[in-house]
Image: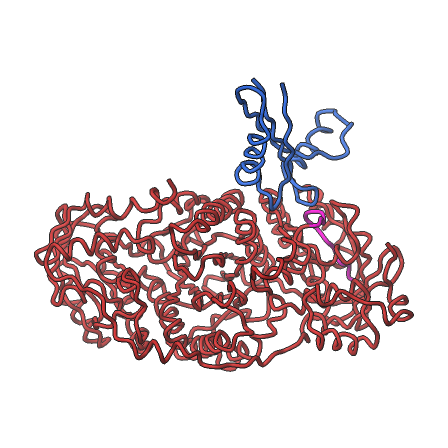
Amino acid sequence: MKLDTVANATANPDTPQPWVELGLKEDEYARIKSILGRRPTASELAMYSVMWSEHCSYKSSKVHLKQFGEKAPKSDALLVGIGENAGVVDIGQNYAVTFKVESHNHPSFVEPYQGAATGVGGIVRDILTMGARPIAVMDPLRFGLADAPDTRRVLPGIVAGVGGYGNCLGLPNIGGEIVFDETYAGNPLVNALCVGVMKHEDIKLAKAHGAGNLVVLFGAKTGGDGIGGVSVLASETFNEAKPTKRPSVQVGDPFAEKVLIECCLEIFKADLVVGIQDLGGAGLSCATSELASAGSGGMEIQLDKVPLRDPSLSPEEILMSESQERMCAIVEPSKVKQFLAICKKWDVTATVIGEVTSGERLHISFNGELIVDVPPRTVAHDGPVYNRPIEKPAYIAERQAVTINIPMPTSSTEVKAAILKLIAAPNIADKSWVTSQYDKYVQGNSVLAQPEDSGMIRIDAETNLGVAVSTDANARWSYLDPYEGVKLALAESMRNIATTGAKPLAVTNCLNFGSPEDPGVMWQFAETVRGLADACLELGLPVTGGNVSFYNQTGSVAILPTPVIGVLGVIQDVRKRTKMGFEKAGQDIYLIGAVDSNMSGSEWAYLHGEIGNHAPKSDLAMEARLVELLLEGQPIFESAHDVSNGGLAATLAESALKNNIGAKVELENVAVALFSETPGRVVVSINESSTNSIIALAGKYQIPVTKIGMTGGSELIINETHISLTELSKAHTETFPKLSG
Amino acid sequence: MATIVVEVMLKPEILDPQGQAVASALPRLGFNFAKAVRQGKRFEIEIDGEPTPAQIAQVEDAAHKLLSNPVIETYVIKVEK
């Protein structure tokens, strides 16, 4: 095949090009031609098409996401903000923590195991790129109905992929979510979060400056994996009518990544890099254009020097390949020898593939012939920006006119049956079948992991400084009211952090939505971003970064709007954290916060095929006071557990089952009290001697606290209803083994 | 009695970490003949009598649905006596 050089493109302006197949729109192709003043070469077309895809360019979301900058709260904790590979937060004692959550939804639908595994691998490299040692991962997952055939295909593969990759890396998996809803059938959501830690002075940025500095590609060799994966998979709706584009599956090698992590950390320690970038979606196209455009702009790359696993790859394929476990570093010439020596020690292939120049253009040659000559900014940052049409969907008004009519149990037999039904529902049931496939304790620093309210990791063995991370979303509330829904998700995530005794510091997000070409979906998205930016401003929590995943849609059915919100908090002494399970018999159980009768979006309503009408209204001022109350009251709490999905019934059952300590509880209006999911509530247990303290806290923070009962016994007793813990446990733990059987 | 053999290999464009590990271990042990190694798996399915076309078709179906992952693997079916 003849090489399509820049000279050839100039000489043959009318050669037909496959821009439609590469996912470009006509005006986008025209824009590339006008930027370059000629038609792009095949390699340039490949680069622009992947970098201008929805997944890489954020072309539909950009106009909304800028609110995170405009409404950013002042924060002393934020060391590196949005725009880098991941945000970095100061947690004190000269430690900095970086965390981020990303989606790998579409690849995980095509090939569940490898899709989920490479999702973990990708986010771990993002964290590593900041100069941090990855210390933990979390995985919020969403699937179609638990008993649907496609769920039975994707769930075991995705869970095994998350576990397989993370376990091989020796990273504890400390939490996440598993949620089922029919809208995720054919569109499972695999979001992966990673946390990393470093000292302040170790922060690295993705920047290529200093003419004469060398560009080094290191890690795995480049193969045909995932060619066009980004543009093809993440930016197109799965549509049965159209033939699907050829699946382009990346395959991960966690052992190669583990070696790459150690190799990078040694390189960082020796201070050998000027800038660094991992190769994820869009591969070398992304790494070279982003590094160059973040620096002075000039870069020369000799593409024929890239080590190949498959020698038949064409230059455009090399540029688009998404082979995993690769990194790209900018290194001063005097340090290259040492850099390569460290790579050799770790048996990591490393090759100088080019250098930073004083010019302003990215030049890529292949066997001495120029095949790419572009201003890198136009590839990496100046992609198209769409102000997509937005229209409030009709279902909102239709929903709001609906009267909820779900059976509420009254007699003690009915209450018992209802509780057993609820805690056995796939969304509430015990997830040990899944989480026991993940290593939660490797490295020996895991303080809390699933099913606790947050995952918690010790950072410093001497001082016991630690961080807590929680991820949350309530997609049904977001469906009813995306503006309130995301605020409630943020409030819940923050509350989960404070429930364990940590102070919330920063926010990350992964916004999973349907097609942006649907004005209704775009409205959900716009409202969500507005809600999250407003809430972060009000609560003083900075957004450190995030990810948008569109086109989670089969035919005309979009997934429920699913903004997954991650909050990171810091705890000065992890030994003082509060756990969810009742600790001892004879302690008083208090409910902090008040209940109302709105059942919309609740699991109890969902179990009766209802989604409801109005999402609850968030009260962030109250949520902030609740966080303060939880932090101040932490020394007197023997246990603390958030009330969220499944309401008080789920909270009480989980707290009792954790350490097999029963409880006797008295509730008014028992059905609403048990099954309503009114936000802003936490159940705590305390010693009787702390009664005055909790009442004082309630007064100080103006949040109602109610003594609802006492721990002890081998039953959960609610008014007249008795359920033995054995029966409760059986219902709670049977669901998953049955589903997988 | 016959044996229907299903051999499953990763597609050539798919990364094979196990094969790579074998390829890099060979020279360490003094075997210098290998340029590349790919590792696959082999199923031996015993049946009574000669396989009928219908049985082969069933094995084909099983190979597609269970024995291989058609997204990343290919298979060949052979009959051995």
Residue A649 in picture, x, y percent from top left: 22, 58
Q: Nearer the viewer, residue A456 or A307?
A: A307
Residue segment shown in magenta: A213-224
> How has the structure been colored for display?
by chain
Residue A679 in picture, x, y percent from top left: 29, 70
Note the chain letter of the red one: A
Q: Is residue A116 left or right of residue B25?
A: left
Q: Residue furthest left?
A: A720
Q: Nearer the viewer, residue B9 or A265?
A: B9
At x 73% / y 64%, what residue is drawn? A47
Magenta span contains residue A511: no
Question: What is the number of callouts on the image?
Answer: 0
Q: The N terminus of chain A lies in which quarter of the figure?
A: bottom right
Note the chain letter of the blue one: B
Residue A591 in picture, x, y percent from top left: 19, 65
At x 18% / y 69%, what residue is drawn? A705
Residue A615, placed above or below residue A344: below
